[in-house]
Image (cartoon, helix red, strand yellow):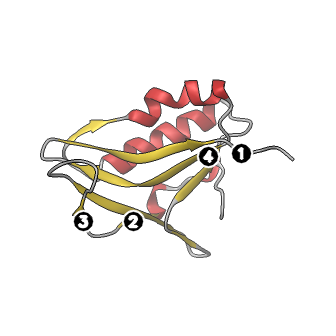
Amino acid sequence: MLILQPDNLNPDYIHFGNPVKNNIIKNGHFRHINYSSHYFSLNTIYINLNSLNQESIHKIIDMEENILNYSKKTKQQNIKQYLDEAIRINYRLLKISGLWETSTHCGLSFKFIHLLKN
């Protein structure tokens, strides 16, 4: 697993798969996200949440906005809504899997992940 630092996120490296039927949202579609640079390609984006500063937080929120701008639907920015709480609870990773869409709305499929300390 390759974990990206928020300061290194580049929206130009984001690509989407073809839409498939969403198994969770009725009458919705899901697009897998790929993050591909000249050096590597990822099926899922993992973002390090350790030692975040205001600039890093803004980079994550900007990344969410950039991904959601791919769709013309009403955007639900849920990472932005939960990021402060996730940091307070001490989550270590943010996993972004893809973009979901209904006939009217879109959002990211994501989750915050705890890591065990050694």
- Give the left or right position of residue 40, taking residue 24 as reference: right
> What is the crowding at mark 4: few (fewer than 14 residues within 10 Å), some, or many (at least 20)?
many
Which residue is label 2 attached to? 15
Q: Is residue 4 left or right of residue 99?
A: right
Q: Amino acid at mark 4?
A: Pro
Rendered residue at 46%/40% (across/down): 62
Dot 2 or dot 3, earlier in sequence = 2
Choose the circle earlier in sequence order: 1 or 2. 2
Q: Please tell me which of labels 4 and 1 falls first in the chain.
A: 4
Q: Position of residue 111 (x, y in %)?
A: 50, 44
Front of the two marks 3 and 4? 3
Mark 2 or mark 4, which is nearer the start of the sequence?
Answer: 4
Residue occupying image coordinates x 23% and y 50%? 101
Q: 10 Å neighbourhood of mark 3: few (<14), some, or many (≥20)?
A: few
Number of numbered markers: 4
Label 4, label 1: how far apart the Cα atoms are: 17 Å
Can you tell which of label 4 and label 1 is closer to the viewer?
1
User: Which label number is shown at residue 6?
Assistant: 4
Q: Residue 44 or 24: which is nearer the viewer? A: 24
Describe the element under mark 3 as helix, strand or loop. Answer: strand
Label 3 and label 4: CA atoms lie apart by 28 Å
Front-most of 111 and 2?
111
* Label 1: which secondary element: loop
